Image (cartoon, helix red, strand yellow):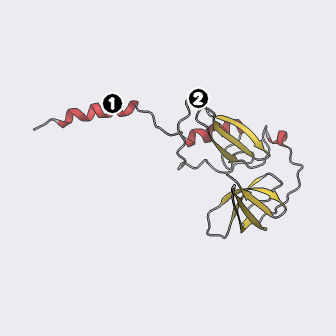
Amino acid sequence: MPHYHFLLPIVSVLSMGAAAPFEDTSLLDRQVAAYLGAGVGDAGGAHAPIDPRLKLKRCPNAAEISETNRNALQVSCRTLGWRIFVPIRLGNNRNSQDRGSSAEPLVQRNQPVTLVIRRSNFSISYGVIAQESGAMGDYIPVRSDRKSKELMARVSGAGEVEMTP
């Protein structure tokens, strides 16, 4: 009869040293919060946590955070070539003064707007409801009805938002 009880400690020791192959999204959330000086969901912080279902390869270096527009940050790993965009809520923090808030909203909260999804060889238009007000270039949440999932789209004109690759 083989003695398998000796195999268990060896397997557990070997598995402890194995690094997770994917980036920890909660760690990225903490890095974004530290960069912005505000937590997830707070004014001046990330609009929502980074989706933990994302399977981003673990970056060998620290992920880079840079500003893209009035209310989004880019989190990227240049070495591996991945990048994600994190929408942020406007508010009072150290970076909100840099972005300025003088732009006039082109989309109002609860306004019906057209969502345009653009690709290289086609585009699709769809009617949605804006969940927040937003100026040109702002990322705002939209949804098609109360039960549908919230999507983040960029304001691209009066009464229009877009999603691009």
Give me the residue at 53% from left, 36% from top.
58
Q: Earlier in the sequence, mark 2 or mark 1?
A: 1
Quarter of the figure that contains the N terminus: top left
Left or right: residue 36 compared with residue 18: right
Residue 77 found in image quarter:
top right
Give whichever of 47, 116 is nearer the camera: 116
Q: Is residue 66 above or below residue 102?
A: above
> Horizontal and vertical percent for residue 19?
45, 33
Q: Within 10 Å of the Cα at label 1, are there few (<14), some (14-19), or many (20+) other Cα atoms?
A: few
Specify the label residue 13 is tagged with: 1
Give whichever of 158, 102 is nearer the camera: 158
> Horizontal and vertical percent for residue 124?
70, 65
Which residue is the extreme one toward the front? 121
Left or right: residue 78 compared with residue 153: left
Kindly identify the amino acid type of the residue bearing the numbered disc 2: Asn
Give me the residue at 67% from left, 68% from top.
144
Specify the label residue 61 is tagged with: 2
Left or right: residue 85 compared with residue 59: right
Give me the residue at 40% from left, 30% from top.
17
